[in-house]
Image: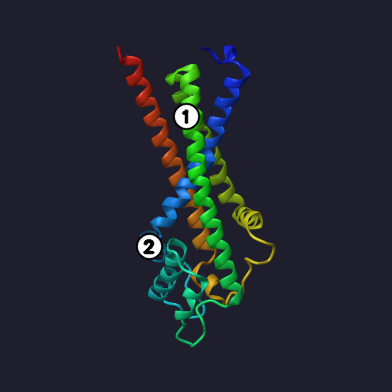
Amino acid sequence: MAESEQTPFVRAVRGALMALIPPLLILGAVRILLISAPIWVPLEYRMPGFPPDRYGFSTQDRIRWSAVDIRFLLEDHPISYFDDYILPEGEPMHNARELRHMEDVKRVVEGAEFALYALLGLLAAGFALLARSEGLAQALDALRAGARATWVLMAALALGLAVAFGALFVGFHQLFFDPGTWLFRYSDTFIRLYPERFWRDTFVLTALITALLAGGLYWMAGAAARRWSSSP
């Protein structure tokens, strides 16, 4: 059925299906990035031009202490988990302000994981509904349209990262965290482990993985459509 002949309900379902795909793929990319952090974070610290810590952390120090943060985010630990980690100077790894932010980050990570599964469920329901009412080809076409929309969004994000990373970074934190709770001194462990270069590269990786996921979705939907159309 041509799009102009679709009922308003079907167009709404198709539009919702397409709209779900970009945030779903972004959340998927974030989840992949978090789970794979023990692999790519050490590589990030070894990248050419990565800024040294002016207060003395070596690359190995950064790898060691960032692994502590990653385990906290990936595993089920209370905030008292950090009580066992003391810097060589005798100070706690994170001060009270950093610990509060770490709790906030963990809540955002858990919320993102919940949203990922919720969007997957909605996508599956919308796909089934559209396939039943309009046919599998229409439902697969909606997936491909959502993948194309994701590419456009990632291209816009890449441009934003190139010309206004600071504004994007601030906007992200203002959206997900209480005002001022994510600002730290240069001497704080957070800034020493995760300078601006770290976050810029993280955003770039997120955009790249999202675009690759969109490419995979586009290819799989197209392959499924071709196979369906050639079936007797």
Residue 108 lies, in percent from the top left, at 56, 57
Amino acid type, callout 2: Pro
Residue 222, given in percent of the width and then of the height, sits at 39, 25
Disc 1 element: helix
Apparent side of residue 173 relative to residue 219 in the rendered image (left or right): right
- Left or right: residue 135 compared with residue 168: left
Give the camera-side residue of 54 and 217.
Answer: 217
Answer whether residue 147 is visible to the viewer in this image: no
Q: Residue most toward the right?
A: 179
Residue placed under numbered mark 2 in the picture: 38
| Secondary structure found at label 2 | helix
Which residue is tagged 1?
Answer: 143
Q: Amino acid at mark 1?
A: Leu
Q: Nearer the viewer, residue 77 or 35?
A: 77
Q: Quadrant of the C terminus?
A: top left
Name the foreground residue: 205 vs 147: 147
Within-10-Å neighbours for mark 2: few <14, some 14–19, many 20+ = some
Against 46, residue 225 (above or below) is above
